């Protein structure tokens, strides 16, 4: 069948609200940019990946697990959930795993959202929340961050209606880097109406170096209406393996299990992650390294009078006036950043890379910004 004809006939078969969903645009792969611009060395600072890579103990465990991939994984991920629970001082029935936290965001939407339901999202924040709501045809209320890109929690509370089922908070927030304090979320939880579930996306929580980091495990142990999303993609350096986990009350998790694919976390990922969790020295090494490099960037931005937004993540949002333009110019110099975030047209987001990559990025910034 001719492709155009096929599409024409298929169009009405598709659930109508899906037509409005536009595809996710990921950071550009290094090989693509090399080819397009004829470059030999390209640095990717576009997807908040860990430049130091995973723990070697984790890699070895993964290699070992490869020898048994003829077997299905443990669908219940019992050993992994036990390891996570121990690390969090919770019991294992407070833990559910997923194929990256991206999958969990979709599972949450599938579990809770019907046509006509509402969710409240911060703006700008992570695009996946919008995707989940769109798949289920739920209505989204966006609540803008303050001008300095910090959270406006009062406005988020005011945005909640009788139809609201879920409120998302992402801290540290992607792509802005802004973060919330433990007390702020605690107060927010107290004011949350009974019919609303808080989903706290803590993908970058291990990078936080503030004196009073969020301890959402505590609220979860107390039975608050809360899910905390974590991932092995960021500080653990396992983005390619696709593994996330979520903490929540067992009664809540039981509903998420209804939409969970039986083998959603693969065997290599499970074994690798157990070893990665065990190697907390590596996690601390990455966190400290990230803090050092963040400070180097800040010093550079201040020296050259560039406006940046302080970040508790492994990325920094920089106001360059015209994000797309500077993104293009950096790319021609072999530095892939990220621009085009809705509401942040003036900005590029730079993921923190190796020391050498960061130095190259700063050099390229000086050239394109004519500093
Ligand atoms: C990277 C990221 C995730 C994690 O995605 P995975 O699917 O686990 O790789 C979740 N939330 C935010 C805000 C992120 O930036």
Image (spheres, grey):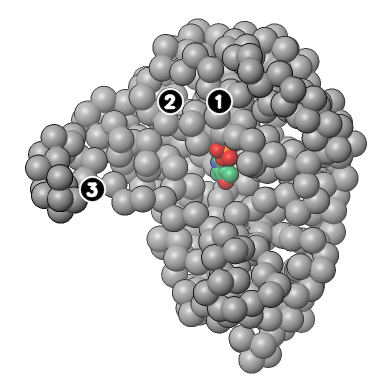
Asked if disc 2 and disc 1 are in contact, CB closer than 8 Å, the reply is: yes
Give the camera-side residue of 85 and 184: 85
On screen, 223 above or below 293?
A: above
**At 58% across and 75% down in the image, what residue appears?**
331
| In the image, the residue with mark 1 has its CB under 8 Å from the nearest atom of ligand 1 | yes
Whether residue 17 is visible: yes
Picture coordinates of residue 22, whole percent (x, y): 31, 51
Q: Quadrant of the C terminus?
A: bottom right
* Callout 3 crowding tier (Cα within 10 Å): few <14, some 14–19, many ≥20: few
Q: Which numbered disc covers residue 20?
A: 3
* 164 relative position to 156: left or right: left
The residue that disc 2 covers is 107
Give the camera-side residue of 213 and 284: 284
On screen, 187 above or below 221?
A: below
Asked if disc 3 and disc 1 are in contact, CB closer than 8 Å, the reply is: no
The residue that disc 1 covers is 98
Give the camera-side residue of 269 and 229: 269
**At 82% across and 68% down in the image, what residue appears?**
356
- Which SS class for mark 2? helix
Mark 3 vs mark 1: which is more N-terminal?
Answer: 3
- Which SS class for mark 1? strand
Quarter of the image for residue 78 reads: top right
Cα separation, mark 2 vs mark 1, equals: 9 Å
Picture coordinates of residue 177, whole percent (x, y): 62, 54
Cα separation, mark 3 vs mark 2, equals: 20 Å
| In the image, the residue with mark 3 has its CB under 8 Å from the nearest atom of ligand 1 | no
**At 42% across and 40% down in the image, what residue appears?**
129
């Amino acid at each position: 069948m001719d492709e155009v004809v096929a599409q024409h006939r298929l169009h009405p078969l598709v659930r109508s609200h899906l037509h409005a969903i536009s595809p996710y645009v990921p950071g550009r792969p290094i090989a693509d940019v090399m080819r397009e611009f004829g470059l030999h060395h390209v640095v990717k600072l576009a997807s908040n990946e860990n430049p130091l890579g995973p723990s070697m103990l984790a890699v070895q465990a993964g290699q070992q697990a490869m020898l048994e991939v003829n077997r299905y994984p443990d669908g219940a991920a019992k050993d992994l959930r036990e390891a996570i629970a121990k690390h969090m001082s919770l019991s294992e029935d407070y833990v559910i795993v997923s194929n990256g936290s991206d999958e969990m965001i979709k599972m949450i939407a599938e579990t809770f959202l019907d046509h006509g339901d509402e969710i409240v999202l911060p703006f700008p924040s992570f695009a996946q929340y919008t995707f989940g709501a769109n798949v289920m045809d739920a209505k989204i209320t966006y609540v803008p961050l303050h001008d300095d890109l910090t959270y406006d929690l009062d406005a988020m509370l005011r945005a909640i209606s009788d139809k609201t089922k879920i409120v998302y908070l992402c801290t540290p927030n992607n792509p802005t880097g802004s973060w919330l304090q433990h007390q702020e979320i605690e107060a927010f939880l107290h004011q949350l109406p009974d019919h609303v579930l808080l989903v706290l996306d803590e993908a970058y929580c291990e990078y936080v170096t503030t004196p009073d980091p969020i301890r959402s495990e505590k609220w979860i142990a107390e039975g608050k209406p809360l899910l905390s999303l974590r991932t092995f993609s960021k500080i653990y350096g396992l983005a390619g393996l696709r593994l996330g986990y979520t903490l929540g009350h067992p009664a809540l998790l039981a509903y998420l299990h209804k939409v969970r694919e039986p083998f959603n976390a693969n065997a290599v990922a499970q074994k690798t992650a157990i070893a990665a969790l065990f190697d907390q020295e590596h996690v601390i090494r990455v966190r400290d390294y990230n803090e050092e490099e963040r400070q180097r960037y800040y010093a550079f931005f201040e020296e050259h009078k560039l406006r940046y937004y302080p970040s508790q993540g492994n990325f920094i949002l920089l106001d360059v006036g015209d994000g797309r333009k500077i993104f293009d110019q950096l790319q021609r110099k072999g530095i892939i950043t990220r621009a085009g975030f809705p509401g942040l047209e003036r900005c590029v987001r730079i993921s923190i890379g190796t020391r050498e990559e960061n130095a190259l990025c700063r050099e390229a910034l000086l050239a394109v910004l004519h500093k």
